[in-house]
Image (cartoon, rainbow, N blue to C red):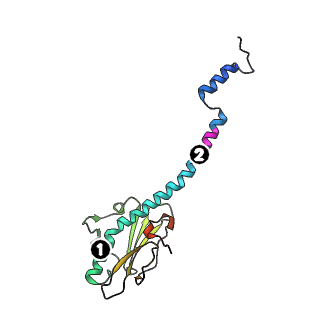
Amino acid sequence: MRHRHWRGKWSRDEYDATLLVSGFSLGEGIAVLALLGGLIALALNPARTSIDHFAATETLLMSTPHRIDWSEQWAIHGEIPASGSEAITRGNTLRQSNGRSIKDPSDLGRFISSVDQRATDGMIVFTLKAPAPQPTIAFRAAFGPGESPATMLWLCGRALVPRGFVRVGADRTSLVDAKLPSPCRGTS
């Protein structure tokens, strides 16, 4: 049986065979690439939200030594430090409770760019590494009723103040609730 040639350089059977070998026509290839591009775009937003959530969770861990040192100062002396870093500084080096020194911001963790400790408003503020504007998460001291030294606890982000406690300082957390760890969210 003789093949008839259509207006191309290949016969119809040869053309059909090339489609089977390559798998896709040009239009199908473009459609697949457009679909993959859409799926990647949909996946990037949750991935960024997850990274922001990891960064916020890291502040819980990295704030522990600071909160312990401030709490020890409160328990021993009945007052928060007179200067923003009196309880946790020795010279120009921050001291963690485990004895490890923090000399530069690179030791603050993967996602934290700086720590601002303010005794005047009883607050420790962590600034996250992110594109501008850089989000912040604040840890504020709250004091319970009773004689000095009363119970001291720390509130993360927009966490609600327990009944009977008085919080010190205004909230300076700028990260949205959806990206904060659950203990730091302001829920009613």
Determine the image quadrant of residue 56: bottom left
**Residue at image x 67%, y 20%?**
13
Query: Magenta residues?
Result: 30-34
Q: Nearer the viewer, residue 109 or 102?
A: 109
Q: Is residue 45 magenta?
A: no
Residue 19 sits above or below residue 54 on the image: above
The front one of 8 and 132 is: 8
Whole-number angstrom distance, CA of label 2 to CA of label 1:
50 Å
Residue found 62% across the figure and 43% down from its top: 34
Q: SS at mark 1?
A: helix
- Residue at numbered disc 2: 37
Q: In the drawing, does residue 71 fall left or right of residue 19?
A: left
Circle 2 sits in a helix, a strand or a loop, which is it? helix
Tell me the crowding category of disc 2: few under 14, some 14 to 19, or many 20 or more residues within 10 angstroms, Cα based. Answer: few
Task: Please state the horizontal and vertical placement of residue 148, each as a whole percent of the image.
Answer: 30, 87
Mark 2: which amino acid?
Answer: Gly
Residue bearing the label numbered 1:
69
Question: Residue at the top extreme?
Answer: 1
- Magenta stretch holds residue 32: yes
From this view, report whether residue 132 is shown above or below residue 116: above
Q: Is residue 86 visible?
A: no
